[in-house]
Image: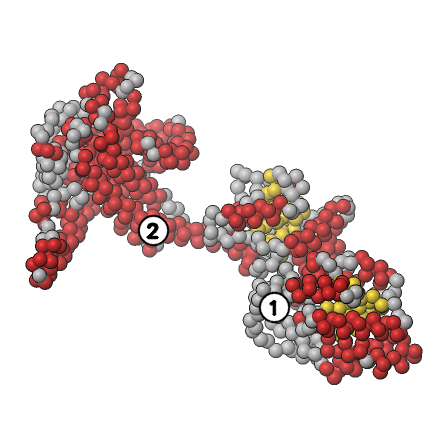
Amino acid sequence: MAQETNTGPFHPLVKGAVNKPGGASAKPPPVHNHGAAQSLPNNTGSTTSQLHIANPGASQAHMKGPSASQAHMKGPSASQALIRADRTTGMLAMSDDNVMMNQILATHAPDGREVDVQPLLYLVEDILNRATQHVDVLVKGTQAQIEMEEKAQQANYIAMLEALTFTIDRIACELSYKAYRGSDAHATTAAIFNFLSSYAWDAKLVLSLSAFALNYGEFWLLAQIYSTNQLAKSMAILKQLPSLLEHTAPLKPRFDALNTLIRTMMDVTRCVVEFKELPSMYISQDAPALVTALNLIPTAVYWTIRSMVACATQISSLVTMGHEYGISESWELSTLAHKLRNIHEHLRQQLNFCHRYIEEKKDVETYQMLLKLFDPNVMHIDNMKILKALIYARDDKLPLIDGATRRKVGLDVLRRKNVLLLISSLEFSSDELAILEQIYNDSRIHETRLESQYEVVWIPVVDRSVVPLSEETRTKFETLRSTMPWYSVEDPLLIEKPVIRFIKEVWHFRTKPILVVLDPQGKVLSPNAIHMMWIWGSTAFPFTSLREEALWRDETWRLELLIDGIDPMILNWIKEGKYIFLYGGDDIEWVRKFATSARRVASASGIPLEMVYVGKSNKREKVTKVTSIINAENLGHAWQDQAMVWFFWTRLESMLFSKIQLGRADDQDPVMLQIKKLLSYGREGGWAVLSQGSDIVVNGHSTTILPAVGGYDEWKVNVADKGFKLAFKEYHDRLHDVAHPCCRFEFPTATKVPESMRCPECLRIMETYTSFVCCHDEQGIPGSLF
């Protein structure tokens, strides 16, 4: 038989009335069959008998001051007395808590033994989840259950259980025995702490929870199978379970309170164990969040074990006293649950701080690793290490989607190939994507050509601070990915924060798409070849800076450079040697005057003239309106497809940014000067470029080109001697020398801005301004830099 433990100065919180309701005489405690029947030693020493005042479940009648209504009736002096009494009560409660915790801390003498509590916790959680019939946790715990079962087969795990069985059984006996005796809850808790003094805090907690689960699981196992198993039925009768379970309805609030408290106990236990498993290589013991948590963990462990004692007492009272007892007594469990929830919230908050701290450390480590990997002096056998670092390092999933087959594939499909990383946000304009797709598909027609030997991979950049992604964001990503014929990352969240940081800080990605070129060994050939792709398409392969400079050396100021393959009809006019006016702007009155005057001049001089309106780099709605008027009034040819307008201006902007990227934005070559003028004119009102065939004659601003056309009567006398082209150019240049139109360039903060620029008109260094631009409801050309 078990010997009664001397609880010292700690006595039951309220004898009889609490532990034996209704004043009923206690039934003799049944013999528990968990082996050792000795109670745990209690070395807590002498402590004031008022410790129970601050504890849930304790009788506080002698501490209560007058009620609020009494104070109100007695006047101000009574109210002040009530306030003083409340303050005194709070101070005493705080003092009692401090005394209790000092007593518990005095028992803590770990001997350095390490206990792998995680597999044991899996087992305990499985027992308690099934006992409390917490379906949600059961579903979520499937993977943990599998891991637990796998670990249970390991020899070291079995050995660990064998070594701890005695300890768990002793605690289970103590919980059961003291619960039947109605012992003081704190005394029982302190006895458990004394017995577990040599263990770490997380081990104390998991071992105690294991002991509680042993008793609680046995209780519910009998309750669940006693009606179908004769052995269980006989045992259940001994424990008086049938009569108890026949009255489950009135006891439901009590069982609900029990289940709530048990689940909160598990939450706190998981949290404490997670702190123990934090990687020391990323977080030190003096990290503020960890210091705060470590100071709180002893309190958390105490109140969790104290709650186990309360739960055990509640169960034993149900068994020994029957269903008539304590239907209203669930308040103590609710009070403990509330206290534990508060503790858990504080611990979880600190744990989140720790995880954030660790994540930041890991992100810095990953970022430094990326810097080393992309060091141009480091050689790699192939591009696999680079691609894994950027996209997905593990081998447990296929991280890419093949745009041609829509199947998932691994990174091996890119091994030792030239890879173009198309990096963008989800704000990818349809015009931009359509042009890029056309260039890509054209390169696939002749796959054996040198310029076709590359693969494109889309790397989406999303806001990692919002995880999981919203349904809207996920849908936008999947819709965009479904339109791409090349490889795409299967999930945008595969791209980790340090990779995004590297992309932004090293490759200068902001919002506009960039195209990073990697050779078969993963070396960066170009940090952004998107400008080369827009200007020359796949002809720019392998997209190196050397190739870019070589292509620029071959370029001249000609109409094909501006048009490329955007409009085949213009290329036919070039072959026929016709005069061609490319013009733009958003002022319909200026467009009317210019188109009418140009046609009159062409008719008068007898030259074959074609006119093409190519819009403006922004103000898309106005451009669409002007295009409609040109068509309606038969003022000439205008591009109907806004994608053509977008591509025309994007190519011009790419030419400037190509030079900026090469560090040659201020090269005084004729091509660059004319491109700068055209970009500036396109920003400032109307403009026009006149060519004869491929040869560009004039590149003029609205303030000079319209007067030049309108002044035909003044310069037509020179046409016979000098020809139309030279006569027009000389007259326009005289007007230009007088007008000197201003030049202006605006660079969004999302692009690389040169430190200085020379004016293409006067060649002086331009002044730098900060401007704020709002286009109201008028949408600019998607992707435009201006």
Left of 215 or right of it: where is 538?
A: right
Residue ID at (24%, 30%): 249
Residue ID at (16%, 42%): 57
From the top left corner, tell me how far across and down residue 258 is, in percent: 25, 36
Q: Residue furthest right?
A: 720
Query: Toward the viewer: 680 or 634?
Result: 634
Q: Which residue is mark 1?
A: 747
Mark 2 vs mark 1, foreground winner is 1
The reply to whether the C-beta atoms of the residues labelled 2 and 1 are less than 8 Å apart is no
How many marks on residues?
A: 2
From the top left corner, tell me how far across and down residue 23 is, in percent: 8, 33
Residue ID at (61%, 78%): 767
From the top left corner, tell me how far across and down residue 481 is, in percent: 61, 46
Report how far apart the C-alphas of labels 2 and 1 lie in the structure.
Answer: 44 Å
Query: Toward the viewer: 99 or 442?
Result: 442
Earlier in the chain: of badge 2 and badge 1, it is 2
Left of 589 or right of it: where is 322?
A: left
Left of 713 or right of it: where is 210?
A: left
Q: Which residue is mark 2?
A: 350
On screen, residue 649 above or below 36: below
Query: Toward the viewer: 137 or 782?
Result: 782
Left of 766 or right of it: where is 111?
A: left
From the top left corner, tell me how far across and down residue 527 is, in percent: 63, 57
Type of amino acid under label 1: Phe
The chosen color scheme is secondary structure
Crowd band around label 1 with a 10 angstrom C-alpha radius: few (<14), some (14–19), many (20+): few
Local secondary structure at mark 2: helix
Residue ID at (71%, 66%): 626
Local secondary structure at mark 1: loop
Quadrant containing the C terminus in the rendered view: bottom right
Type of amino acid under label 2: Gln
